[in-house]
Amino acid sequence: MSDSDASSPSAAPARNYLNFATTAKSWLLTLDHKRIGLLYLISIAFFFLVGGFGASLVRLELLTPDGNLLSAESYNKMFTMHGVIMIFFFLIPAGPGVLGNFVLPLMIGAKDVAFPRLNLASWYVYMTGASFGVAALILGGVDTGWTFYTPYSSTYANSQVILTGLGAFIAGFASILTGLNFIVTIHKLRAPGLSWFRMPLFVWAMYATSIVVMLGTPVIAITLVLILLERGLGLAIFDPALGGDPVLFQHLFWFYSHPAVYIMILPGFGIISELISCFSRKRIFGYGFVAFSSMAIALIGFFVWGHHMFVSSQSVYAGLIFSFLSFLIAVPTAVKIFNWTATLYKGAIVFRTPMIYALGFLGLFLIGGLTGLFLSSMGLDVHLHDTYFVVAHFHYVMVGGMVMAFLGGLHFWWPKMTGRMYFQGWAIVTAIVIFVGFNLTFFPQFLLGYLGMPRRYHVYPSEFQILHVLSSAGASILGGGFLMLYIYLPLSLFIGRKAPRNPWPATGLEWEVAESPPSPHNFETTPVVTEEAYNYAHKDHAFFEQDIVDILPEEDENV
Amino acid sequence: MTNEFRLMPPVASDFAARVDVFYWFMVLMSVFWVVAIGAVVAYFAIRYRRRYRTQRPDEIHGSNRLEAAWTVVPFVLAMMMFFWAAHLFFDYAQAPADAMEILVTGKQWMWRLQHPDGTREINTLHIPVGQPVKLTMTSEDVIHSFYIPAFRVKADVLPGRYTRTWFTPTKTGSFHLFCAEYCGTEHSRMGGFVHVLTPREYDEWLQTASTAGGGAAVARLSPADAGERLFTRLGCVTCHGGAAGALGPSLVGLFGRERELADGTMILADEDYIRQSILYPQRHIAKGYQPVMPSFEGQVNETQLMQLVAYIKSIGSQKIGMD
Ligand code: HEM
Ligand SMILES: [Cu+2]
Ligand SMILES: [Cu+2]
């Protein structure tokens, strides 16, 4: 790319990472972190649809107490497919794979990640894993639940456990490659002047996430292999009939899968910090505390796995330690919520779609977190474990928390990624529809859970029906909201207004230096950082893309 | 069972009442935080919305005093919840000595239950009100979980070992019994009802249940008595009969004691130890004996195993011999 090209007058569109080459090959063999981010975006958008289809059938079946839509077997396969896809092929790659890949190098002023080839390989590995998952579906599905509890999964289940297990196993390596790449990138490729405590909080969050990925994923990989060995070769590991220990599996599984909850949510914390700071026009309150609370959560998160096993014959004393640590981890989480709230204080708050999602996140994640305390309470979890209370809790965290944060981030960086503005009216309406639909879907499930409705039930006693009907009604609203995203976001690529370099106007190298969309190598010259992150006090606040200019006066009229 | 709509499950055990108190505390605490933080966020969002285009926010970077406050307050609250909930759990984990013991085996997809006098039932449980009941449970295949929401009690039921739980019903009536751990195709149908009866009704029920059962004589045998018969039939008695020179130790007084093994370690002789001694005798060799006991794996099913254990337990309380 020659300089004359890039700076040529505006008649011809500027050369950027999207238009400089458009062949299929230039996409499929790209080493550009931005394009890889988009490849991930398209893939997870597809899997979200498939997983959402599973959820729709589950909710439709639960409209009535007896199983009159699906057979018990297909119902079980449906919620398993929903869970497996949403966790392994949608939410785990969503934070790092899409937004991490696209924004992280831009944020730290790098031309790319440290190992671009590994980065491309990670997408292929992910797609290979996901293809195994899809193959398992086509070849009859799997009915173990996404938790694969033994000895059901290893000996008794009569479905595609091996293929699905392999799929999740392979997809795990994609996460590891991404995590490795981010850690090295953050250590080695920060622009001159960008010291650790000048990094945007999204970078801190990705750093914490990557550490969890690197330490946790190998354990689930080994565990899945052990299941495959027992199922395929009859090796005695988990099935007591062969001399194994079924609870050992639960320890190994949750040793990864609890931290995996943080793999899913930590990137969300980072996104929310960016959004709240930008749309309050203020530096984040307590930067250091927010950064370190991510690290504390990542660390303690490794030692709470036993809170999934209070009633599975674990010793009372082990339970005590796990319960204690689960309460402890609530503290840094609370610290984050308080700091985000305090950031709003005396700000100049602008309501744009990303901010609507961020405020929605605050409320929903708060409920998700507080109900987590119910489940960490040993005496109460005896009753709540494996009921709909748990289903409600993790959806408040994963959908109310992470999916909201992800959508907020997606709208925030959409102009940067695509060079187009989305339609503000549509976007705000959609955000509100999703918020309302979400609460109607999942709040009744808390009540169902306390009433004693067990999860993974194809048929249920009729006194639970009213709450189930409410939940299914909410799900159809929620589903409608999600579908609207699939309409207006792609549409904006064609008829959306052209995005300026910095539509919000936000701080950060990706906004202040890189173009929208960025050039193939992000920056023409390596940027130099001379100030802290979120230095909004010294920025221009006047211009906002899609501003309601004529409603807002230029100066304060009350003085 | 009524099908009326309700928002709280029935409270039918004393544990349930205590769990509910804690639950309401948690609900109030959560409502407080959601309302408080929600109100502050809403107030800030309105009060500090951008009203004119050149508006400047105040420059505030943080406050260590506030950070300390909102670290310490949640910590103290969290510890309070932790201790309260742990206290409740200890209650759940320890059955009283006078509890009536019911044996439970889970199997895809039904529950088999056996009363102390040998009466058996499937997917229903009849118990007298006010009587502490202790369940000793195992599974013949995958993991299940025995769950009675009205008692707020649940415990996983594992293959290859015994798990326990207990409760004291405080209210007569019929309450749901569920399997709470996903166990395969008909998981959602693996359950029925717990019928809590007055002690008189319970006695009457025992009468009719055992005569209605047809093979009344067999059904009426208590697990310990059935175990004693097995003990003779399977030939255990030849080695464990207590005769001088017998190959194995007398089992009288064994249950509940610390047992010294050949390698010098001590082990508690509980249900799991006895079970393992029968199925996998080579795993733990009792001190002073040769490893000659044959394995009975495949020759006894879970119900028979439970009966053998019940028998060895019953002679364990006789407290003679080994001291
Ligand atoms: C679109 C709206 C969604 C609806 C209506 C929905 C509904 C449900 C329902 C009813 C179940 C319970 C199945 C059962 O236990 O019988 C369930 C389970 C689950 N959902 Fe969702 N869900 C939605 C979105 C999501 C998303 C976005 C995720 C993750 C990112 C997710 C993750 C899970 C997981 C992990 C399970 C557990 C599956 C299992 O028990 O094996 N769900 N969902
Ligand atoms: Cu967990
Ligand atoms: Cu079950």
Image: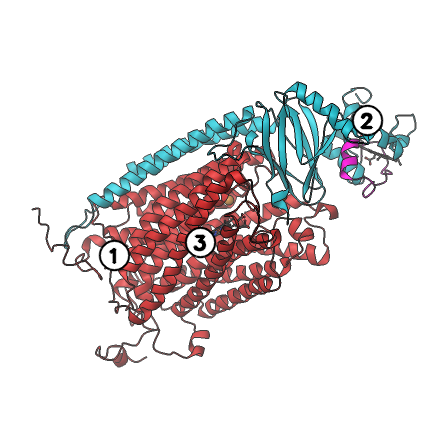
Chain colours: A red, B cyan
Please say if B115 is above or below A165.
above
Badge 3 residue CB within 8 Å of ligand 1: no
Of the two numbered discs 3 and 2 in the rendering, the one whose residue sits closer to the viewer = 2
**Spatial CA span between label 1 and label 3:** 25 Å
- Alpha-carbon distance for marks 2 and 1? 83 Å
Q: Which residue is mark 1?
A: A531
Q: Main secondary structure of the magenta part?
A: loop
Q: Residue at x 44, y 69 (%)?
A: A116
Name the spot of residue A549 as percent of width and height, x first: 16, 59
Q: Earlier in the sequence, mark 1 or mark 3?
A: 3
Q: Is residue A384 left or right of residue B300?
A: left
Total numbered badges shown on the rendered structure: 3
Chain of the residue that carries numbered disc 3 in the rendered image: A
Amino acid type of disc 1?
Glu
Near-viewer residue (A183 or A12): A12
Circle 1 packing at 10 Å, graded few (<14), some (14-19), many (20+), is few
The chain containing the residue under callout 1 comes to A
| Mark 1, secondary structure of its residue | loop
- Which of the numbered marks, if any, corresponds to residue B225? 2
Q: Is residue A533 above or below residue A516?
A: above
**Between A253 and A352, the one nearer to me in the picture:** A352
Which span is picked out in magenta? B286-308
Q: Nearer the viewer, mark 2 or mark 1?
A: 2
Mark 2 is on which residue type?
Asp
The residue drawn where x is 39% and y is 63% is: A486
Q: For the residues tagged 1 and 3, is the chain the same?
A: yes
What residue is pinned by disc 3?
A209
- Callout 3 and callout 2 share a chain: no
Q: Residues within 10 Å of mark 2 (few under 14, many from 20)?
A: some
